[in-house]
């Protein structure tokens, strides 16, 4: 148990380091940029309406105070962190005066739901199929499955999502291709709403699953086909241990350990995919919010989305890492 | 080197197919050096012409000949991928070899930084870069940023190989013969990690070109520079599928799939080549 706590503490330090580094990098990027957020916002505001010079000057003063761009770097950096810790990143500009954080928190459940379910499905199906394909190397069905998933795997998320959109949008329109739920359903914990959400999430989730499967399949098949040649597997077979026990407890469980490590490493990449998928299927999550905010020049919301996504991805990796020792007793003992 | 290539082509169908696919795309991209039209100009041809003898891939709604447009786009995208791959390989070799060979606190510090880079999601950061740089963001800037994030996976791989090399006889000989650390790493250890470098090179290109497509499709790059992504961006912004200009979308998508499957097959077969057991199985030994 002490070993586990030590392991968890080390991972926690790493979690903090990732968040610190990521957020600091964001600050540096925004600080070093040749574009002044105040002028950018002003440009957007004055392009739409006729403001008097006095009003522009007053707005500029207010915005400078809000962004704090007139202060020295270090003060700005400290301010940035203190506001972040209080969860206050200013008002969004595209939905003024809603706080940017609130927009993000509204979008977060959609992305989390999509990301978690599709990652879980991908991980389970990919590893199971890969493990079986490594063990039963002559199965035609599994070979065919492997060729299809491997063919899809290298193709960028966007292209796969786009092809699905064309297939289900133009050629065979049976599933909704846009939005998070049907227009005529009132949001709430009611059956029609949940069904509508599930129905709308099918295509985005499908595109994420299709792209993700191949990687797990290939990795697991390679791991299992190495493990199968180990002496203890031969011994178990000779000793007459049941087939499913060998596959499940002896082979796949051992092969799963590096795969869980890999899961922690790909979450960041899967998140990028989710962002694209949301944009393609017009899903109301963080990705769509980010794209809208960039197009609207909404400084606070872009920062809020980036911060939360960095923190969320780091947290997800942290949780996966904590699960790791449960599978592999050697990590616990260290 | 040629013997290796010959063996790979003879015994590894995946490598051969990958080589042919990538070769086709590379030749197609290289044609853009002889392009009769400037791919950044618009309304040079009759818009919306389907594929014909005159316009092999048709023309788009912006009056561009899609054949030359795509040729230039693939050249730019491949060059972008190669730039990112070369730059990030340099970082990953330096970090991986140094961490593996020197060990101790150097290793711990480098791997700590490595793990941080693995965990930071790159997409929001790239979008943030675009958001603050806007039109200052050209493809070389983007390649630099992506190279800064594309090395950690491979640095870890290289480190694990370098760890094994450290205790080998020849390393000790080299050290006793008075070779400097830099020389040991570059002359003795580097050749051993080259297969990994080649295989991860392909994977890195897949990753960076895919990322570029993603960003460009959203309009988050310099959209006037023809790349695979910007071709799709313009197709989307003119609703090509809806108005029936299908060749504007279908032909690029087919070419992209060819490129990605080709690069992927090369990476996979290269990986297999690194592992001698699977190579022997394939040769029937």
Image: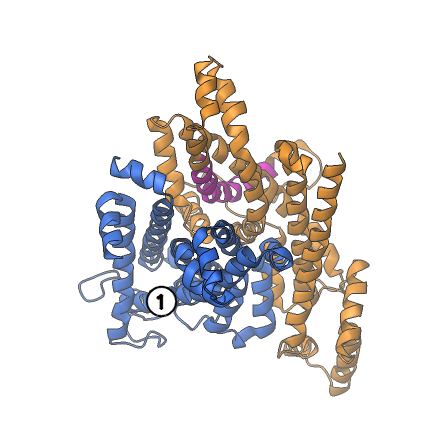
Quick check: can you spot residue B158? yes
Q: Residue B247: which quarter of the image?
A: bottom left
Q: Nearer the viewer, residue B182 or B198?
A: B182
Circle 1 packing at 10 Å, graded few (<14), some (14-19), many (20+), is many
Q: Which residue is mark 1?
A: B73
Residue A187 x/y as whole percent: 69, 41
Question: At 53% from the left edge and 31% from the top edge, which residue is drawn?
Answer: A254
Residue furthest to the front: B176
Colouring of the image = by chain
Region rendered in magenta = A196-220
Magenta span: chief secondary structure:
helix
Relative to B61, does residue A114 appear above or below in the rendering? above
- Chain B on-screen colour: blue
Q: Nearer the viewer, residue B23 or A229?
A: A229
- Chain A on-screen colour: orange
In this picture, residue B21 sits left or right of residue A243 = left
Q: Residue A33: which quarter of the image?
A: bottom right
Residue furthest to the top: A240
């Amino acid at each position: 148990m002490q070993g586990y706590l030590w392991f968890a503490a080390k991972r926690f330090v790493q979690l903090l380091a990732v968040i610190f580094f990521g957020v600091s990098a964001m600050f540096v990027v925004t600080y070093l940029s040749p574009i002044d957020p105040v002028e950018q916002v002003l440009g957007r505001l004055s392009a739409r309406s006729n403001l008097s010079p006095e009003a522009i000057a007053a707005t500029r003063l207010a915005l400078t105070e809000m962004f704090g761009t007139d202060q020295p770097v270090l003060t700005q950096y400290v301010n940035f962190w203190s506001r972040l810790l209080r969860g206050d990143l200013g008002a969004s500009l595209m939905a003024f005066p809603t706080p940017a954080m609130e927009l993000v928190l509204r979008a977060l459940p959609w992305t989390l739901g999509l990301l978690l379910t599709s990652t879980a499905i991908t991980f389970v199906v990919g590893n199971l199929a890969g493990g079986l394909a490594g063990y039963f190397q002559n199965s035609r069905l599994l070979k065919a499955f492997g060729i299809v998933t491997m063919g899809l795997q290298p193709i960028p998320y966007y292209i796969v999502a786009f092809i699905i959109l064309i297939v289900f949008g133009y050629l065979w329109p049976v599933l909704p291709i846009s939005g998070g739920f049907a227009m005529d359903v009132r949001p709430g914990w009611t059956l029609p709403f949940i069904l509508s959400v599930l129905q709308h999430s099918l295509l985005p989730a499908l595109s994420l699953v299709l792209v993700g499967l191949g990687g797990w399949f290939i990795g697991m098949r390679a791991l299992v086909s190495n493990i199968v040649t180990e002496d203890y597997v031969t011994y178990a077979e000779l000793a007459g241990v049941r087939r499913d026990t060998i596959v499940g407890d002896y082979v796949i469980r051992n092969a799963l350990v590096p795969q869980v490590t890999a899961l922690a490493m790909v979450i960041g990449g899967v998140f990028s995919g989710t962002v694209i998928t949301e944009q393609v299927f017009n899903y109301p999550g963080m990705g769509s919010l980010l794209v809208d905010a960039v197009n609207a020049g909404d400084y606070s919301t872009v920062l809020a989305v980036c911060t939360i996504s960095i923190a969320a991805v780091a947290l997800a990796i942290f949780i996966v890492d904590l699960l790791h020792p449960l599978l592999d007793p050697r990590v616990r003992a260290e | 080197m040629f013997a290796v290539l010959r063996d790979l082509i003879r015994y590894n169908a995946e490598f051969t197919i990958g080589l042919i696919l990538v070769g086709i795309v590379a030749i197609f991209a290289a044609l853009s050096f002889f392009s009769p039209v400037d791919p950044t100009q618009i309304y040079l041809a009759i818009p919306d012409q389907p594929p014909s003898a005159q316009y092999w891939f048709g023309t788009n709604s912006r009056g561009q000949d899609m054949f030359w447009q795509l040729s230039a786009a693939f050249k730019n995208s491949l060059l972008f991928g190669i730039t990112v791959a070369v730059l990030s390989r340099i970082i990953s070799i330096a970090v991986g070899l140094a961490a593996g060979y020197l060990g101790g606190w150097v290793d711990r510090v480098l791997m700590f930084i490595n793990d941080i880079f693995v965990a930071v999601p790159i997409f929001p950061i790239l979008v943030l870069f675009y958001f603050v740089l806007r039109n200052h963001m050209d493809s070389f800037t983007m390649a630099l940023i992506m190279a800064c994030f594309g090395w950690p996976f491979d640095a870890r791989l290289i480190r694990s190989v370098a760890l094994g090399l450290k205790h080998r006889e020849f390393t000790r000989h080299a050290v006793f013969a008075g070779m400097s650390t830099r020389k040991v790493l570059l002359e003795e250890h580097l050749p051993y990690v080259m297969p990994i470098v080649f295989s991860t090179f392909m994977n890195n290109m897949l990753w960076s070109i895919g990322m570029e497509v993603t960003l460009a499709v959203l309009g988050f790059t310099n959209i006037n520079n023809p790349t695979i992504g910007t071709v799709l961006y313009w197709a989307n912004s003119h609703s090509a599928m809806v108005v029936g200009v299908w060749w504007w979308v279908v032909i690029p998508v087919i070419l992209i799939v060819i490129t990605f499957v080709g690069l992927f097959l090369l990476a996979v077969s290269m990986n297999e080549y690194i592992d001698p057991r699977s190579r022997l199985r394939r040769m029937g030994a």
